Image: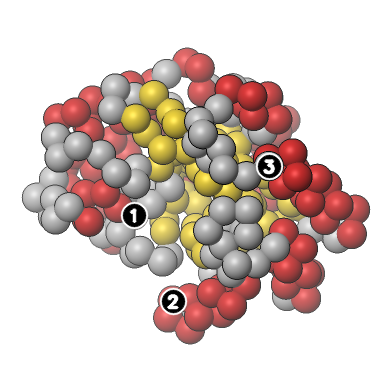
Amino acid sequence: MEVELLEKFKSMMKNRYIFHLHTVYTDGSSSVEDYCRWASNNKLDGIVFVEHTSRKLSYDFSSFLRDIEIAKRKFPLIDIWIGVEAKIIPGGQLDIPDNILSRIKLICFACHSFPDDIELYHTSFKMLFTDKRWKEYIRCWVHPGRFLKHRGFLDKYLNILEDLIEVAINEEIFIENNLRDQLLPHRIVIKIPPSKLITGYDVHSVEAIGELEKVVGRQY
């Protein structure tokens, strides 16, 4: 990974930013420009798009990138980052097309569905986190524990979650504190070094930002 790029990302995290935005290109209802205009009106320093991706991409990624470039010119005071959210596949691989890997610098690891096999879940994430292929990217584990919660496993296997977070941190992977899901217990959050913990909104519209802030308060 480029040291300069990583330091720039860490610097962005010290300012007023919003991380984890989905657009009309996937399951969002706000455009790239909608978010950037909102960020400009609210005096934010940075925003991070984390758009869904898969090997069978359902949208034009080039068009998405063009929208980002237009927004960068239109809103030059905002530090705009492009990321993707890629699902883990049993065995520790990612559901992401090779042809976009050279066009991004930020990959977010996610688990939306998985076999009900905790040992496979555990070992697959360990393999993913230690896979040298992804070390050249800025990496973040988004909504950690969501799959466990949805399957009713979270309380029973908090030790698994804690172990994976420790592995991720040792591998220089950021951990998202997902505001929408409120997944991570306080006792886990306080163990994560502040430099590795990134606040994630995980929203699908500009309106959803305001709705979330009514519940959790402003985070920037």
The disc placed on residue 189 is: 1
Mark 2 and mark 3 lie on one chain; the one further toward the N terminus is 3
Q: Is residue 11 left or right of residue 143?
A: right
* Depth order, front residue of 102/1: 102
Mark nearest the camera among 2 and 1 is: 2
The total of numbered circles placed on residues is 3
Determine which residue is flagged by label 2: 216
Mark 1 and mark 3 lie on one chain; the one further toward the N terminus is 3
Q: Which percent across, then down, holds residue 161?
A: 24, 43
Q: CA distance from mark 2 to mark 1?
A: 16 Å
Residue 203 in sight from this viewpoint: yes
Q: CA distance from mark 1 to mark 3?
A: 37 Å
2 and 1 marks in contact (CB < 8 Å): no
What amino acid does circle 2 point to?
Val
What amino acid does circle 3 point to?
Asp
| Residue occupying image coordinates x 29% and y 22% | 91
| Residue occupying image coordinates x 62% and y 58% | 23
Q: Secondary structure at mark 2?
A: helix
The disc placed on residue 60 is: 3
Mark nearest the camera among 1 and 3 is: 3
What amino acid does circle 1 point to?
Val
